[in-house]
Amino acid sequence: MYELLLTSHSYLRYFVLIMLLAVVVRSLMGWFGNKPYTNVDDRIGLYLLIFTHLQLIAGLILYFVSPFVRFDSTTMKDATTRYWTVEHVFVMVIVVALITVARSTSKRMTESLSKHKRLAILNTIALLLIIAVLAMSDRGVLGTTTAG
Ligand code: HEM
């Protein structure tokens, strides 16, 4: 159960990163190139939201079964347990909120330019936060414990 969840959470990260990068690139191009917001933009945004929420669910369950999540007097002294118990979760919940708010608020906007701008700003922050927090772990941004 733990192995399966960790592997799923690990691989889903690549899907989240790819979709997030796609949304950031397209919204920046839309914003600075003054392009219309199309069905393709909407589809990519939807997939990003789905993968991100699946990642949240897997992460939440993982939080209760991971041996690196501990609540005792040593948690904050040990860099690994501090990272997985506090830092990773704290930043990733903000990331999920940013991606969700970007999608839900931009949906309500009517102008393409405003949509692109909102999506570009919030998703770029989310992408930078993911890269920064994963780089802080001893596994790196693209690394894994499960597949070698
Ligand atoms: C977009 C959001 C997230 C991304 C990109 C992400 C990414 C990752 C990555 C790359 C790993 C390491 C996987 C491996 O070693 O193979 C990991 C592990 C983990 N994540 Fe996340 N995560 C996200 C959200 C969350 C959330 C919201 C939680 C908790 C509520 C969470 C809890 C955990 C836990 C507990 C571990 C496992 C530590 C272990 O036992 O090895 N993650 N995550």
Image: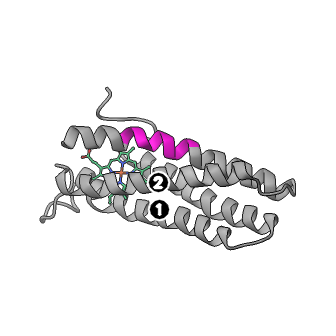
Can residue 138 be seen here? no
Residue annotated with mark 2: 52
- The residue at 67%/52% (across/down) is 24
Residue type at mark 2 is: Thr
Badge 1 amino acid: Val
Q: For mark 1, does the 10 Å Cα neighbourhood hold few (<14), some (14 to 19), or many (20 or more) residues?
A: some
Q: Magenta: predominant secondary structure element?
A: helix
Residue 12 figure quarter = top left
Residue of label 1: 96
Q: In the rendered view, does 63 fall on the left or right side of 72?
A: right
34 sits to left or right of 94 = right
62 magenta-colored: no
Judging from the image, what secondary structure is the residue with disc 1 in? helix
Dot 2 falls on a residue whose secondary structure is helix
Instruction: Using the image, determine if residue 26 lies above or below residue 7.
Output: below
Q: Is residue 58 above or below residue 125?
A: above
* In the image, the residue with mark 2 has its CB under 8 Å from the nearest atom of ligand 1: yes
| Identity of the residue drawn at 72% across and 72% down | 109
Task: Pick whichever, 123 or 57, lies toward us.
Answer: 57
Tell me the quarter of the image containing the C terminus.
top left
Residue found at x 87% / y 58%:
34
**Left or right: residue 3 compared with residue 102:** left
Q: Where is residue 82 in the image (x, y as percent from the top left)?
A: 27, 58
Q: Do the residues labelled 1 and 2 touch (CB within 8 Å)?
A: yes
Quadrant of image for the N terminus? top left
Instruction: Write the start and end of the magenta stretch as one range.
Output: 10-18
Which residue appears farthest toward the front when viewing the image? Answer: 39
